[in-house]
Amino acid sequence: MILEDIADNLRQYVNLSKEELRVFFDLVTVKRFKKNEILVHKGQENSPFIFIRKGCLMTFFTDEKEFKHVIQFGLDKWWTGDLNSFMNGEPSIYTIKAMADTEVLILEKKSFEQLCQDHHAFERYFRVLFQNSLVSHQKRIIRNISFSAEEKYLTFAKNHPKLELLIPQKYIASYLGITPEFLSMLRRKLAKRK
Amino acid sequence: MILEDIADNLRQYVNLSKEELRVFFDLVTVKRFKKNEILVHKGQENSPFIFIRKGCLMTFFTDEKEFKHVIQFGLDKWWTGDLNSFMNGEPSIYTIKAMADTEVLILEKKSFEQLCQDHHAFERYFRVLFQNSLVSHQKRIIRNISFSAEEKYLTFAKNHPKLELLIPQKYIASYLGITPEFLSMLRRKLAKRK
DNA sequence: CGGATTTATTAAACTACCTTAAGAAATCAC
DNA sequence: GTGATTTCTTAAGGTAGTTTAATAAATCCG
């Protein structure tokens, strides 16, 4: 079975033959999760690479003080997962949770390796994917080290209006590296200003 | 010509035939820079992808207030460059400067595309490279949003003892996202404690 | 070597952001 | 729909980190 919406998305990055698409869809499994379900638990081994077909996922990291830090949100047509755990077989340091009812494709490590090894096109696809992701990670680091909380929030709100509506503020605060109380105060200040 | 130290390094990530190595070394050019020379200027188009054979490079970003923010240090056998500029042909937002006498390989976009397109092995090499880089970028983001200045500094000092000696403190402070004055104070405090 | 320039230190005053705590609002579950 | 739970707001007090500015130390360069 070939899911056309996903096939279209893959083909935005690389040319894929019908045959290659078939291989891809043979190797992935479709799963559905209800809001608040956990897809990947902290400490889980063999954590998969996840393609979000529709919905929203949140990846967070729990520190020694049981404090949660949001690392990433994922929306439709995004890949997510604990890359380190996925690639090196280590236990996942993240938890991945559905923030809305979500449908995903699950790609296991073995299948990923097979795709990449047997098909230059998929190797290329993931090269481009990681490369683009790197660019946005670098931009995020710049924001982290050079923006004030207000600038970080305004940038986030501008770049991710959908998430602003969907995600509880406290998680957005965590993603930005500030406290929910401070974000609340910022929003009040910004609202008044207008 | 094949530079064996570099060939060995490439082969750590992927199998490369003699022929493929020859192609690689035909496409790159070796350049040397003296300490403090600029390799890539802010605004420069067609900024290359750079492999550091020996030496040290620093990548920084200059904001609207002419304030410099250090994004990355690079040592022997590291790739560096403004990926966004390299991939999308946009002007570089970074400046890249030699922090010591440095010998590099320069890979132009056209050559990179050729390597990736013609040789699955190089496509794979860069896929793995970007993938590993992503993992460390994610770890850095975690540190950014969840560590205190002291924790960030201690982690840096532990992970990069060579850079600690080589790089002026003010740049390390910038890399960590704190002021040089505060780093100085931190170091004094930490030194006393021992 | 010696003067010029860059880098590091120190300290005092300041501020962005955090902590705590309590109440209000929204959402969830039955 | 109503009680329980989670999320958001507000405010007071605290602290980590900044700013400014002046001095000291290190490095560069002719």
Image (spheres, coloured by chain):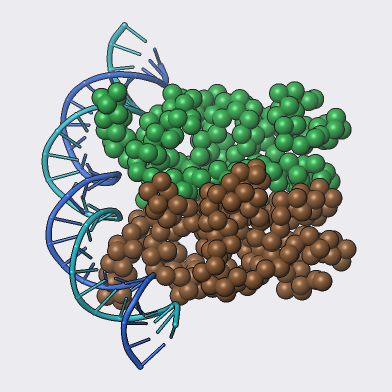
Chain colours: A brown, B green, C cyan, D blue
Q: Quadrant of the N terminus of chain A?
A: bottom right
Q: Residue B109, can we see it?
A: no
Which residue is pictured at 59% across the width and 62% down the height?
A39
* Apparent side of residue B183 relative to residue B100 in the rendered image (left or right): left
* Apparent side of residue B142 relative to residue D13 in the rendered image (left or right): right
Q: In the image, residue B120 lies at what x, y percent?
A: 82, 45
* Apparent side of residue A73 relative to residue A128 in the rendered image (left or right): left
Which residue is pictured at 70% across the width and 46% down the height?
B127
Q: Residue B166, can we see it?
A: yes
* Apparent side of residue B116 relative to residue A180 in the rendered image (left or right): right
Which residue is pictured at 61% across the width and 43% down the height?
A90
Query: On the image, which quarter does residue B147 sit in?
Result: top left
Q: In the image, residue A165 lies at what x, y percent?
A: 45, 75
Q: In the image, residue A138 lies at what x, y percent?
A: 53, 50
Q: Quadrant of the C terminus of chain A?
A: bottom left
In the displayed structure, B80 sits above or below A194; it is above
Which residue is pictured at 76% across the width and 46% down the height?
B123
Depth check: give the residue in front, B18 or A29. A29
Query: On the image, which quarter does residue D30 sit in?
Result: top left
Q: In the image, residue B153 lies at what x, y percent?
A: 39, 35
In the displayed structure, B73 sits above or below A29; it is above
